[in-house]
Image (tube, rainbow, N blue to C red):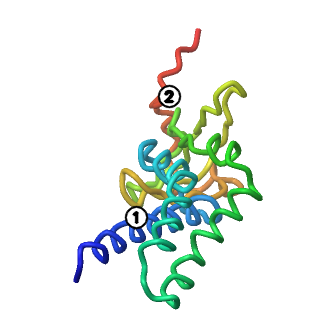
C-alpha cells in the first residue's frame, strides 16, 4: 500500500471515530466523562470535517471512492450547519460529579450522582442521575428511579467529590 492510502486510512479512521463518539454522546444514554475526550470529540467534529472532505476529494483516485468517502464528511458538515457550530462547541463541556448521593450495594460501578456542567458565561447546568461507569472515561446515564430511598440495594452516602473544584461559602 502506498503512503497516500495509509494517510487516507488514518485521516478517515480518526474522523469516523470522532463522528461515532459524537453520535453516541449526543443522542444516546452513553456519555463521555473525560473532559479531554469530550472536547476532542465535539471540537474535532467541527475541525476535521472540512479537511477530511478536501483530502478525500483531492487524493483519492477512483471516482467511486471519492463519492463514497465524501458522503460522511458532507453529511457531518450539513449537520454542523443545521445544529450550529457554536452550539456544538458550547456542548463540549463534560458533566462533572459534585456529590455521590447513593451507591449500589450490589454493583460498585452503579451510583446516583449530582452532576454539574460548566457552560461558560451561561453558568452551570445541574442534574441528578443514575450512572453506570463503563470505564473512568465513559458512562451510561439514566433517570433516577422513583422511590429510590426505599429500595434496599441503594445506600445513601452523600460523598462530596467536587470535580469542578467549586468553592461554596
Looking at the image, which residue is at 56% across and 59% down?
50
> Which residue, as the protein is rendered here, is positioned at the far right?
82
Question: SS class of the residue under badge 1?
Answer: helix
Q: Which residue is under mark 1?
A: 14
Q: CA distance from mark 2 to mark 1?
A: 29 Å
What is the quadrant of the N terminus in the image? bottom left
Query: Residue 73 or 122: which is nearer the viewer?
Result: 73
Query: Residue 54 or 166: which is nearer the viewer?
Result: 54
In percent of width and height, residue 123 lies at 69, 26
Looking at the image, which residue is at 52% across and 54% down?
131
Vertical arrangement, residue 152 with respect to residue 66, above or below:
above
> Which residue, as the protein is rendered here, is positioned at the far top?
169
Looking at the image, which residue is at 58% across and 74% down?
72
The image's mark for residue 42 is none
Query: Residue 69 or 22: which is nearer the viewer?
Result: 69
- Dividing the picture into quadrants, the one containing residue 2 is bottom left
Looking at the image, which residue is at 52% across and 32% down?
98
In percent of width and height, residue 165 lies at 47, 23
Query: Residue 125 or 148: which is nearer the viewer?
Result: 125
Q: Which residue is under mark 2?
A: 164
Residue 160 showing in the rendered view: no
Q: Residues within 10 Å of mark 1 (few under 14, many from 20)?
A: some
Q: Residues within 10 Å of mark 2 (few under 14, many from 20)?
A: some
Which of pointers 2 and 1 indicates the residue nearer the eye? 1
In percent of width and height, residue 68 lies at 54, 85
Amino acid at each position: 500500500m502506498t503512503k497516500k492510502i495509509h494517510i487516507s486510512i488514518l485521516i478517515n479512521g480518526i474522523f469516523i471515530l470522532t463522528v461515532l463518539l459524537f453520535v453516541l454522546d449526543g443522542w444516546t444514554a452513553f456519555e463521555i466523562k473525560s473532559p479531554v475526550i469530550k472536547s476532542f470529540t465535539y471540537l474535532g467534529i467541527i475541525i476535521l470535517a472540512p479537511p477530511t472532505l478536501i483530502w478525500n476529494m483531492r487524493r483519492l483516485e477512483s471516482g467511486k471512492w471519492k463519492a463514497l468517502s465524501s458522503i460522511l464528511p458532507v453529511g457531518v458538515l450539513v449537520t454542523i450547519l443545521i445544529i450550529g457550530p457554536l452550539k456544538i462547541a458550547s456542548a463540549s463541556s463534560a458533566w462533572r460529579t459534585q456529590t455521590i448521593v447513593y451507591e449500589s450495594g450490589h454493583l460498585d460501578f452503579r451510583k446516583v450522582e449530582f452532576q454539574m456542567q460548566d457552560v461558560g458565561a451561561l453558568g452551570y447546568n445541574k442534574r441528578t442521575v443514575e450512572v453506570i461507569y463503563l470505564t473512568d472515561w465513559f458512562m451510561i446515564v439514566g433517570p433516577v428511579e422513583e422511590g429510590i430511598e426505599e429500595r434496599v440495594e441503594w445506600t445513601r452516602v452523600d460523598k462530596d467529590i467536587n470535580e469542578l473544584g467549586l468553592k461554596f461559602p
